[in-house]
Image: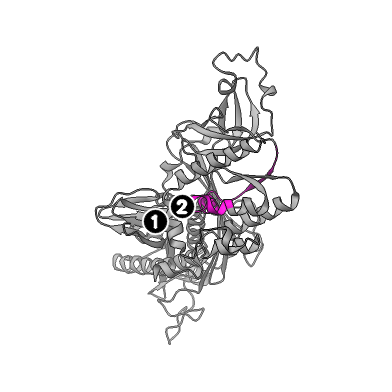
Amino acid sequence: MQEIKRKYVIPGDIVAEGNLRPLVNVFRIGNSIVATRIGIAESNKDGAKVIPLSGIYFPRANDIVIGKILDHSSLSWSVDINSCFNAHLPAQDIFGRDFSPAHDDMGSQLSKGDVIVARIAIFDRTRDPILTIQDKDLGKIPTGELIKISPTRVPRLIGKRGSMIQIIEQASSTRITIGQNGIIVVSGKDKEGINLAINAIHIVEVEAHTSNLTQRIKQLLNVPESEIENDDTKRNHEINDTEMNDDKAISNKIDKEMGMMNSNGTK
Amino acid sequence: MVQNRSLIDESGKRSDGRIIDELREIKIIVGIIKNADGSALIEFGKNKIIAAVYGPREVHPKHMALSDRCVVRCRYHMSPFSTDTRKSPAPSRRETEISKVIREALEPALMLEDYPRAAIDIFIEVLQADGGSRCAGITAASVALADAGINMRDMVSACAAGKVDDKIVIDINDTEDKEGGADMPVAYMPNLKKITLLQLDGELNSNEFKTCLEEAIRGCLKVFEIQRSSLIEKYFGDEKGLNE
């Protein structure tokens, strides 16, 4: 495994010197790569980047997000995705190419206040994001508690190969759907389990960057040591694994989790 | 700018007991406004200022949005109880001007092209004023912007220098501002080594101007260290292991 250098940075700090590739949240000035956000800087021979610790959600194509229907025009729904742009879900996405505002009743499919899991189909900053719910396991979420966390904490909440979220789901007997925009839906049969899961999620959000977090979450949820194999006593390694592959980790997790929802017959 | 009493005594002490190249005590607390995306409280001597940043967020009214970059809106406001005599809460000519210069001092540090069609709102509320509130406001706003996770090329630190009793002094307070010879607020990007604000009220010859600017930049660098440590404290607390 190649060596990764890490340090805490604020905007303007030099992450690395030399002919490295600037990846995310950094820019190049002369021979230096400089951070643009507060966070943990990582550099190796592939390039340098900063994992941010603060910030709002900025959409990216192919992100899985959870949004709330705000309104609809005759051609699309407008969806709040916890970002600076409202997303649009075209009616054709649901009714198909033959959609006609005169014949199809958009209200019959989604109405104001409904919560959906969707994928950002198109976003290039020049226009508002376009959503789709046509992929597997996307669509309306029937029940659950809606909570909001900082989008920068989403990879930590999911954990190394989904370890953290699995611990919370198993210990609280709930199902947790995570959007990359920081919106989370917790659903389950008993209220106590839901409350326990919400508490655990809030602790992960507040203490995301601290060591031994998985340990403390296990204690909170009364999980015996033997049940969970992954441990984050070596926190740096965990940050590496989750953050380096955060996109992949999230989509895998969401795929897996949607699979679970299906197998449980909730969708 | 009429100087009618000595503001520096024989022992070289200024009206508030500082020596000529000494800054007032500065304290910054990050993230004190939960509703805001980023915020900071700065205590710069007797100045107490809150900066709150919202965004990037939707632009209302929509016609204000720019298709190629983000709009920055800045409001500097002094609360009615911030001064000795009540200040009318309505925005004054001075506040409108300071809002504009603060916005222009911060904009070069922001990567606005990353957020087209959006807006960043900066609110600077002066709770207690004692001279140098625009510098303290810029310093706090820069910390709040970093706290909000907005892409920045560099932090912006601000500090004033000026002339009192024909001596160049750093970090002018209210008395020195009103009774001294010159006041020069400077905002500076410490890593990029670029000036983003330079104003001058008073008269300086070219040598004095040069010294004054150098002193102000030296002050900005000291302010930057405090900005930096306050952000590190908030985000990493005791977990300083990576940098040590």
Instruction: From the image, tell me which residue sits under label 1.
Output: B154
The label on residue A242 is: 2
Three-letter residue code for mark 1? Asp
Q: Nearer the viewer, mark 2 or mark 1?
A: 2
Total labels drawn: 2
Image coordinates of residue A26 in percent, x first then y, are 37, 51
Q: Quadrant of the rendered structure where residue B30 is?
A: bottom right
Picture residue at 43% right of the left edge, 76% below the top = B22
Above-or-below relation of B47 to B64: below
Q: CA distance from mark 2 to mark 1?
A: 28 Å
x and y percentages locating residue A169 in the rendered image: 62, 50
Q: Residue at x 49, y 75 (%)?
A: B4
Magenta span dominant secondary structure: helix
Q: Nearer the viewer, residue B193 or B152?
A: B152
Part of the protein shown in magenta = A143-166
- Left or right relative to A208: residue B151: left
